[in-house]
Amino acid sequence: METKQVIAALAALAQENRLAVYRLLVERGPAGESAGTIAAALELPASSLSFHLAQLRHAGLVTQRRQSRQLIYAADITAMNALVGYLTANCCGNPTTAAPVCCPVPAVAEPVATKRARGRS
Amino acid sequence: METKQVIAALAALAQENRLAVYRLLVERGPAGESAGTIAAALELPASSLSFHLAQLRHAGLVTQRRQSRQLIYAADITAMNALVGYLTANCCGNPTTAAPVCCPVPAVAEPVATKRARGRS
DNA sequence: CCATCATTTCTGTGATTATTGAAATATGGA
DNA sequence: TCCATATTTCAATAATCACAGAAATGATGG
């Protein structure tokens, strides 16, 4: 993942409403959710939501598909994978230099909606 | 890690110069680097750098200490851990719903200072 | 104290971003 | 075709951010 894209993704998520939208979409999974439903859930004016969805989409974090009259948005997990991968790599530093302790990705903060904290491999 | 802080951290990193500063500091490890040296390395005016360092510091991503006349900045790895933890948790979604594949944290991108642009996205 | 160095804070300016109502576009049904 | 619905695009405004020179602050050595 190259720097320009990383910045785009970070900027897209660095906004209260957009982070909320993204989190909601992650919760919904691949099925996604229509713009209207998201707007209702987050109590955002349609035009505002559209603006934010466009940013998330431009950053590659969400996908869009049409289902009859509505546009369904869904989180693109691979983009988040790439972002987390980049941050992890840059957090861990360069092993050839005096690098800090490598990120252990601490047993997961608070999951989107339920408790769940399993240590990954 | 609460949302407000996550947004602050994301916003702090979502800027070309700041991301560069942070990456440089990660490279330097706990020893850190003085403001002047960073400014020289990244060719930034002192006042601009100071502005960016303040943001990173406010977001809790870097620490500041004085060493005689100079101020040494260092990356705070625990903050990045928390951020990555939050993103991972939110990326993985809620297992009780139709959740997408959980982030495997793809075998780490490219380390801070090596050649880039290998096959992966 | 004074001179000097390192860095920050102040200040003004230009650029980007967020927000929304209103108008425009696309879709499906009668 | 005409209408209703879902969503976007447009336009205008307010808010925030980035930049960099100049002035101020804090530290050190003489």
Image (spheres, coloured by chain):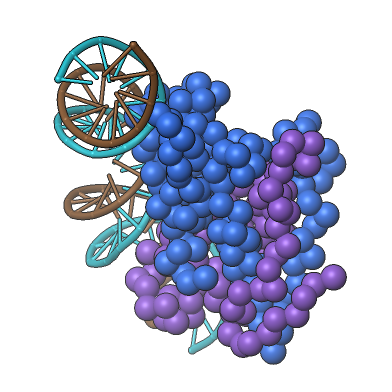
Chain colours: A purple, B blue, C cyan, D brown
Q: Position of residue A75 (x, y in %)?
A: 63, 67
Corner quadrant of residue C13: top left
Q: Nearer the viewer, residue B23 or D24?
A: D24
Q: Position of residue A103 (x, y in %)?
A: 70, 57
Please indicate whether residue C6 sits to the left or right of residue B78 in the image.
Answer: left
Q: Nearer the viewer, residue B45 or A33?
A: B45
Corner quadrant of residue B74: top right
Please indicate whether residue A96 sits to the left or right of residue B67 in the image.
Answer: right
Q: Position of residue A97 (x, y in %)?
A: 74, 36
Please indicate whether residue B30 sits to the left or right of residue D20 in the image.
Answer: right
* Residue at 49% from the left image edge and 31% from the top image edge: B34
* Residue at 68% from the left image edge and 68% from the top image edge: A106
Up-down relation of residue B94 to residue A104 (above or below): below
Up-down relation of residue C25 to residue C9 (above or below): below
Corner quadrant of residue A119: bottom right
Up-down relation of residue A61 to residue B2 (above or below): above
Q: Position of residue D3 (x, y in %)?
A: 37, 79
* Residue at 59% from the left image edge and 64% from the top image edge: B82
* Residue at 66% from the left image edge and 73% from the top image edge: A108
Q: Nearer the viewer, residue A81 or B68?
A: B68
